[in-house]
Image (cartoon, helix red, strand yellow):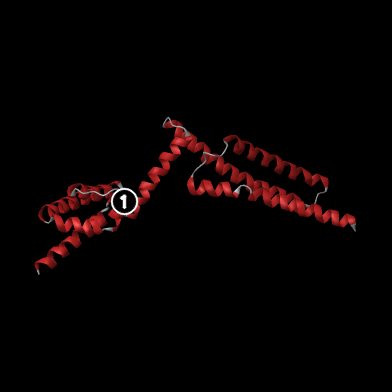
């Protein structure tokens, strides 16, 4: 009876080790796949990890000659094979990041900060419908046109434009100090506003002007 309990206990710990061998790499793989951030990961750890996995696979294969149950051999070989693939994925991304950083004469940390900053800019532009260099040129052209329209409206109806800007949500969120000069207030709004914000202000100003003419 005690021998049977010992065998069951041995099997439980073996399969627990097999499962944890795979699971311990998943958080790192998830982080790397989502963020491409490998700055906190050791290159040498992920060089030696696959070598370790290959050694375990070789050990599992050799156990065939020792009359070990085939399911144990398969369990070890499969878990170590999966672990090896996951570790190699992290290692490849790490080496690519280091290579890119070196080509730019930067540390990995400096390169990653630049990478995330560019990614945020691309995400913001994408949310505005900008997906290519042609779109960026078109976006800048539209912004220049809207700036000119807003400037002309400000020259003709400074109070109307100014009142609309003061009520605008995006302006209130970014206003850290009270700007008393109307022209500076307009310039500040143009710097923080997207095309959609500028177009919205222009439309509201025209509505105000139209209502006053009635």
Nearest to the observer: residue 58 or residue 184:
184
**Rendered image quadrant of residue 164:** bottom left
Q: Report crowding for label 1: few under 14, some 14 to 19, many 20 or more residues within 10 A (C-alpha).
A: few
- Which residue of the protein is positioned furthest toward the top in this rendering? 105
Residue 210 at x, y = what percent? 12, 66
**Residue at 76 percent of width and 52 percent of height:** 13
**Residue at 71 percent of width and 42 percent of height:** 56
Q: Is residue 129 above or below residue 36?
A: below
Residue 2 at x, y = what percent? 89, 56
Q: Is 133 left, or right, of 60 in this rendering? A: left
Q: Does residue 138 appear anywhere in the picture?
A: no
**Residue at 47 percent of width and 36 percent of height:** 109
Q: Is residue 200 above or below residue 45?
A: below
Nearest to the observer: residue 39 or residue 185:
185
Assign a secondary structure to mark 1.
Answer: helix
Q: Is residue 83 above or below residue 212?
A: above
Residue 135 at x, y = what percent? 28, 50
Nearest to the observer: residue 93 or residue 67:
93
Q: Does residue 190 appear anywhere in the picture?
A: yes
* Residue marked by disc 1: 174
* Quadrant that contains the N terminus: bottom right
Q: Is 40 left, or right, of 142 in this rendering? A: right
Residue 78 at x, y = what percent? 68, 50
* Quadrant that contains the C terminus: bottom left
- Which residue of the protein is positioned furthest toward the bottom in this rendering? 214
* Number of numbered tags placed on the structure image: 1
Q: Is residue 69 above or below residue 214?
A: above
Nearest to the observer: residue 84 or residue 116:
116
């Amino acid at each position: 009876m005690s021998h049977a309990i010992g065998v069951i206990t041995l099997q439980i710990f073996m399969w627990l080790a097999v499962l944890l061998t795979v699971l311990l790499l998943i958080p790192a793989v998830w982080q790397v796949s989502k963020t491409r951030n490998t700055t906190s990961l050791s290159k040498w750890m992920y060089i030696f990890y696959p070598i370790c996995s290959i050694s375990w696979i070789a050990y599992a294969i050799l156990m065939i000659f020792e009359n070990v149950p085939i399911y144990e051999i398969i369990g070890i070989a499969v878990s170590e094979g999966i672990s090896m693939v996951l570790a190699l994925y992290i290692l490849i991304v790490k080496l690519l990041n280091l290579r890119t950083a070196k080509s730019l004469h930067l540390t990995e940390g400096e390169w990653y900060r630049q990478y995330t900053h560019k990614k945020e800019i691309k995400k913001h532009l994408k949310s505005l419908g900008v997906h290519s260099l042609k779109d960026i040129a078109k976006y800048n052209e539209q912004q220049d046109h809207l700036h000119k329209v807003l400037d002309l409206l400000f020259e003709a109806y400074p109070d109307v434009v100014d009142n609309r800007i003061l009520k605008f949500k995006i302006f209130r969120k970014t206003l850290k100090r009270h700007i008393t000069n109307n022209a500076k207030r307009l310039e500040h709004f143009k710097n923080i506003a997207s095309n959609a914000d500028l177009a919205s202000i222009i439309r509201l100003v025209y509505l105000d002007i139209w209502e006053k003419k009635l």
